[in-house]
Amino acid sequence: MRDVTILVVDDDGQIRDVLKIALERAGFRVVQARDGVEGLRSVQMAPPDLAILDIGMPEMDGLELCRAIRRDSEVPILFLTARDDEVDRILGLELGGDDYVTKPFSPRELVARVRAILKRTKGAVPEVRSLERGRLSLSPEAHDCRVDGIVVQLTATEIAILSRLMARPAQVFSRPKLVDAIWGPGMIVSDRTLDSHLRNLRSKLGDAGLEDAIDTLHGVGLRMGPCGVA
């Protein structure tokens, strides 16, 4: 996987070194940035396959950097955050982050999270090239979502959730089952994390004129809505 580049942005040199060693041992190519400004410049010059951003950086922090990256790019983003910064973690996901790891972190867990995100980036349902339902169309492998032919920009995790639901539109997915399908069995993902991704996905589709894309069956789970078709 030396052709897969991971950008690590953190003002702590020791953490950068730990991440570099762990990721390179896992077969990834690693590029480092010491702060948000340098990280943004790196993304603009040579977009990575995934970016790891520390939230608590001075000047341009990880949240500001994520916001700046999302103006022009859908590169997957993994946040590093302090254990007690739940507000920052949720805000980061709402800004377009794909996942987060809390400090102190296990390098093995971080590599697992990176692999899971990259797997979602390639499409949660790779055997299906195109999915359609009502006014909504999705090509997971091309990372392309459209409503009435108009592109809707989604993150890798949002694509993964939507493709999983669209592939089996009549099936109701319980929350634990959906988490396992997207993040992988055994991965610990909070309800707040899933809620943030679903809220973002619904908001983007709603802004595109599709407010009925995802149905919630309270106490049961989630399934695809009619997507504009009566």
Image (cartoon, rainbow, N blue to C red):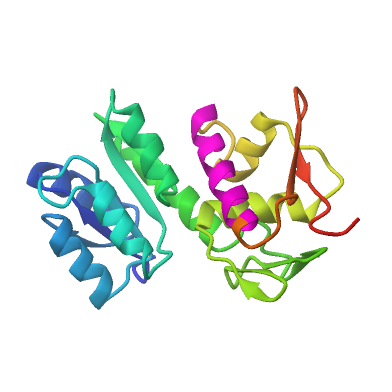
> Where in the figure is residue 170, as x and y percent of width and height?
87, 46
157 is within the stretch colored magenta: no
> Where in the figure is residue 194, as x and y percent of width and height?
55, 36
Left or right of 172? Residue 157 is left
- Identify the residue shown where x is 19% and y is 70%: 41
> Where in the figure is residue 133, as x and y percent of width and height?
81, 62
Q: How many marks?
A: 0
Left or right of 177? Residue 14 is left
- Identify the residue shown where x is 63% and y is 57%: 205
Q: Does the image show residue 189? A: no
Q: Does the image show residue 74? A: yes
Name above or below for residue 188 compared with residue 100.
Answer: above
Query: What residue span does the magenta drawing correspond to?
Result: 189-206
Quadrant location of residue 176? Answer: top right
> Where in the figure is residue 142, as x and y percent of width and height?
59, 73
- Identify the residue shown where x is 36% and y is 35%: 89
198 is within the stretch colored magenta: yes
Depth check: 186 or 62 in front?
62
Quadrant location of residue 124? Answer: bottom right
Quadrant location of residue 144? Answer: bottom right
Quadrant (top left, top right, bottom left, bottom right) of the C terminus: bottom right
Quadrant (top left, top right, bottom left, bottom right) of the N terminus: bottom left
Depth check: 16 or 170 in front?
170
Main SS type for the magenta part? helix
- Identify the residue shown where x is 15% and y is 42%: 15
